[in-house]
Image (cartoon, helix red, strand yellow):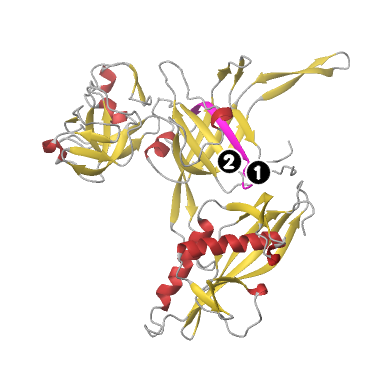
Amino acid sequence: MQNAKDTFYLMLQQRLAAINPQRIIVVREQRRSGTLVVENEAPSAQVPLDCFRLQWTSLALDRTSALPLVALTCEISYATDGTRAMAGMDRGRLFSAMDSELDSALSRPPLSTPKLDCTASDSGVAPVAMATNIFWSEPAFGAITATSERLSRTASVQVFAFQEAGEA
Amino acid sequence: MTPSTAPITRCIRAYFGPVDRTAGLPTLFDPAQLGRFPLDAPPAPWVSLGSISKFVRISGTKVQPLLGGAPAMAVAQVRTEVDASVSFEFDAWGKLQAALASGSQQTNLLATAAGAAPNGSGGAAAAPVTVVPEGTTASALNVGATAAAQFAPGTLIAVDLDYTGQTGYVGSGISAAYVSSAASVGSDLNFIRRVTLNVAVVASVAGGVLQLASPLPAGVPSAGMQISPLVGFCDREGARFFQEWSALFVLEGAQGDRVLFHYPRLQPMQASAEHGEALISSTPSVSSAPLERMRLAAAFRALPVRDPADSETVLCFRSYLPAPLRTV
């Protein structure tokens, strides 16, 4: 199921970058598009702002199908303080833009994508398309949280994938 | 090869095509040739009516045993009755969706003449506007600069022939109504435009030409067709006409598999009905009531066609196109 998680991340990263190429973050002095998977990053007390942070939470397996069906919950959190130039008074607009970007990325057809075998990507080998597709539900947006001037929200998406033969 | 799995889908798409009622010819869909068509660009003359919900197919076919011997035992089976119906709700409202869900004839509410007497399905219509053949296409209507002044972007129009005493099925492109006698429709010059499904929305007006938002369903207007502006659509409980359509429902699976349900002949089996649906609420503890979204509910009975492949008389075709590289 790691391939399903990696595929979903790559799909979401590419779609969000296409929607808003200006959403860039700096992680360990590297400029990257504004999407990251928390479990793949170094632990930090700082919450990165103005980006989408993916966390994988619950897992369910259905073995009644010819191929086991895996259901993973992905929680996507994002937050903003607004810009310093606007003294944070644009935080509502920036936050609405992030809502819209995430909804567009997840709701735009196609709502499935070929699952990628990413097991060798650490060695520099490009991911290889597998035999099945992953697909996902519509995002469920949680309530907005306002802490001082910071606005944050977590959206949940169910990601589904068939577990192929020999796949970890 | 990968084991095949049950199709998983988020929605079903509906496409409808006209039936030539006079000739008794439905629009046939060949899944072997066109089964993988792009969902947003159906092959002509199929018209996409968008996604549908609560799609239910019901078979009323009865299979009875033939009994023989003592004690009686089933020695064979026979089909004593063949019946099929389909019901669903449209996710959007539009001219065709409302017409299909009306259960009978749908009427265009033509803009009325000054002083027209009130009528439930629209009063006497204003004088129609002549279509000038030169420069006219299925999506651009030349009416001349003077007549164009009465149209504006957003104007709904019906384009069809004048009623001059025709009987039988009327309506260009799609049979919209059945006229038993000229007297029954009061010899109304605008009657065909009153019922036609050949309608469009004016997107822009320039140089005496009405540019339409989408092409007319019946194609380039033929000689003698005129234009009547309209304000909306009306259907009536108790009207006697049965519409008939060819239908195609497509279930697009998440793995690239596709299931197609083709009903060459469908007639409505329920009168107009709507289903109220509560809107989603951004906060579960706060109800959105009394706001409701009204969905058009439709139910149809399938009528038979003969499959020339083996001369069987059938009601519908279900086709399954597996995902690539799957076991079958």
How crowded is the residue under tag 2: few (<14 C-alpha within 10 Å), some, or many (20+)?
many
User: Image height check: is B232 above or below A141?
Assistant: above
Q: Left of B204 or right of it: where is B32? A: right
For the residues bearing labels 1 and 2, Cβ distance under 8 angstroms: yes
Which residues, given as a range, are shown in magenta? Answer: B254-268
Q: Nearer the viewer, residue B248 or A130?
A: A130
- Decide: is A147 above or below A158: below
**Nearest to the observer: residue A121 or residue B212:** A121
Q: Which residue is mark 1?
A: B7
Residue type, label 2: Leu
Q: Which residue is mark 2?
A: B251
Under mark 1, the amino acid is Pro
Q: In the drawing, what numbered circle is on residue A46?
A: none
Task: Give left or right: position of A136 versus B107.
Answer: right
**Quadrant containing the N terminus of chain A in the rendered view:** bottom right
Quarter of the image with the C terminus of chain A is bottom right
Residue B56 point in image, percent of width and height:
59, 38
Question: Along the polypeptide, which appears first: circle 1 or circle 2?
Answer: 1
Q: Nearer the viewer, residue A147 or B281?
A: A147
Magenta segment: does it hold B265? yes
Which SS type dominates the magenta stretch?
Answer: strand
Please tell me which residue is depicted at 85% across the width and 17% down the height of the picture. Answer: B72
What distance separates the C-alpha of mark 1 from that of mark 2?
8 Å
Query: Residue at left 74%, top 42%?
Result: B1
Point out the residue furthest to the left here: B146
- Position of B76 with respect to A84 (left or right) is right
Residue B91 x, y percent position in the rendering: 47, 46
SS at badge 2? strand
Q: Residue furthest right?
A: B70
